[in-house]
Amino acid sequence: VQLQASGGGLVQAGGSLRLSCVASGISLIRHNLGWFRQAPGKEREFVAGISRNGARIVYPDSVKGRFTISRDNAKNRLYLQMNDLKPDDTAVYYCASDPAILTAPVSTSPEAYDYWGQGTLVTVSS
């Protein structure tokens, strides 16, 4: 089982990036999915989550209105569109999957997620 995140890079404040996460060895259709981030010296932070069928989406206030999570179950992929990026968004971003029943709520806790990608670095310059 492997999750591979990509799309990070260096961007100026106010810019945009789109992160992607592709899974191999596992079908994501039975998983709630999430994006987390971790800045140096800080704990891993929930960024966005989406339920198996996309019906439930959760964002923390820090990214609400700027970030959009989406998924393509046919392609076994997860995405995170990040707009109006700020220097505080600088972190390593991780995708993660949580095997869940169809009606399970989207968890914001890293402990709920069983599989993790390797992370992709996003750096936002001021």
Image: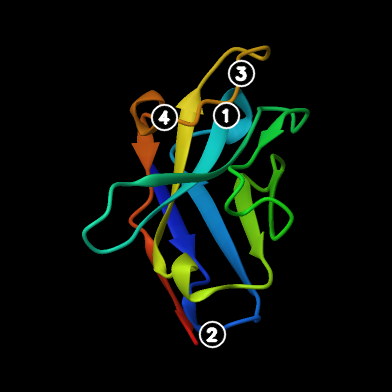
The Cα–Cα distance between marks 3 and 1, rounded to whole angstroms, is 8 Å
Amino acid tagged 1: Asn
The quarter holding residue 110 reads: top left
Amino acid tagged 2: Val
Q: Locate residue 16, reporting x and y percent.
A: 65, 76
The Cα–Cα distance between marks 3 and 4, rounded to whole angstroms, is 11 Å
Depth-wise, is mark 1 or mark 2 nearer the camera?
A: 2
Q: Locate residue 17, reporting x and y percent.
A: 61, 73
The Cα–Cα distance between marks 4 and 1, rounded to whole angstroms, is 12 Å
Q: Are marks 3 and 2 in contact (CB under 8 Å)?
A: no
Q: Which residue is mark 4?
A: 109
Mark closer to the chain start, 3 or 1? 1
Amino acid tagged 3: Pro
Mark closer to the chain start, 4 or 1? 1
Q: Which residue is mark 2?
A: 11
Q: Which residue is located at x 59 percent, y 12 percent? A: 101
Q: Secondary structure at mark 2?
A: strand
Q: Are marks 3 and 4 in contact (CB under 8 Å)?
A: no
Q: Which residue is mark 3?
A: 105
Compared across the picture, whether 124 is left or right of 118 comes to right
Q: Locate residue 42, reporting x and y percent.
A: 27, 54
